[in-house]
Amino acid sequence: MEVNVLETEFTVPSSASDPEGRMSVAGMFDKFMDLASEHAQGLDVGFDAMHERRAFWVAVRTRVRIYARPRLMERVQARTWPAAPKAVKCDRFYTLAQGERVLVEGRTEWVGQNIDTGRVMKVGDFGYPLWMEHRTERVCDAPFTRFREQPDPENLCLTYTVGSRDIDMGRHMNNVAYVRMLLGTFTVAQLEAMDIAEVEVSYSMACREGETLSVYRRQDGEGWHFLVQKPDGTAAVQMAIRLGA
């Protein structure tokens, strides 16, 4: 197996399935996060190694493209690999497939953050294997969206207090917890009626336990747009759900 790609196979579990027995959108985000963590561990930039260097991986932006959803108990092949890093940013790619058929593609932009100062670190400063030969294959490669959502009182759909259930090893709200929170603003019937083709998330500011967040949601011709605002009015997260034709 190449050192710069992780390939594995899994069975879609009930914990990652929606009420219709399909792999949920949040389940896809969870799977990609787990794949990245496993591969990073093998590259000596996993949680323990990064913690020793006072660093932590933080997701900046993610795009997931859905062509078809695997169902509960189906077997799925998963792959993940990193692109050659820039000075501070790293792209990682993912695919879920059944045989030759690609079901889901994903791309996440990551940075290493100093645990003590909160500052973004240069890739070479936290032990990333710069010597490694990187694959040139890319998926979901369109430029990330520059979100410019503005709060509109008429679009306020949720106020949410961050709890211990949301906090990850970085002691802030986990990137998938935002996805669950935002998808949770819809009813089951609304979600079942949606043909979700793409989800894109931009993470700007970390949210901490006890903070009460304001969630704004608006609909347009392509789907739904979300803004998550911290108590001081700062934009923490923005997300777009794009529907299929």
Image (tube, helix red, strand yellow):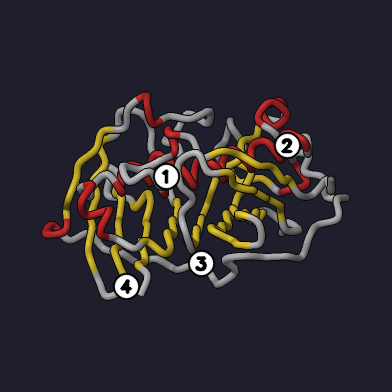
Residue 127 percent location from the top left of the image: 78, 39
Q: Counting residues from the N terminus, which is met first, the one under dot 1 or under dot 4?
A: 1
- Secondary structure at badge 2 equals loop
Q: Name the residue under label 1.
A: 26
Vertical relation: 65 (above or below) 191: below
| Measured Cα–Cα span from mark 4 to mark 3 | 16 Å
Q: Foreground mark, 4 or 3?
A: 4
| Measured Cα–Cα span from mark 2 to mark 4 | 38 Å
Dot 3, how many residues are within 10 Å of its Cα: few (below 14), some (14-19), or many (20+)?
some
Q: Name the residue under label 4.
A: 222
Q: Counting residues from the N terminus, which is met first, the one under dot 3 or under dot 2?
A: 2
Query: Do the numbered discs 1 and 4 sit on residues whose CB atoms are within 8 Å?
Result: no
Q: Mark 2 points at which residue?
A: 45
Q: Counting residues from the N terminus, which is met first, the one under dot 3 or under dot 1?
A: 1
| Measured Cα–Cα span from mark 3 to mark 2 | 25 Å
Q: Counting residues from the N terminus, which is met first, the one under dot 4 or under dot 3?
A: 3
Quadrant in the rendering for residue 102 = bottom right
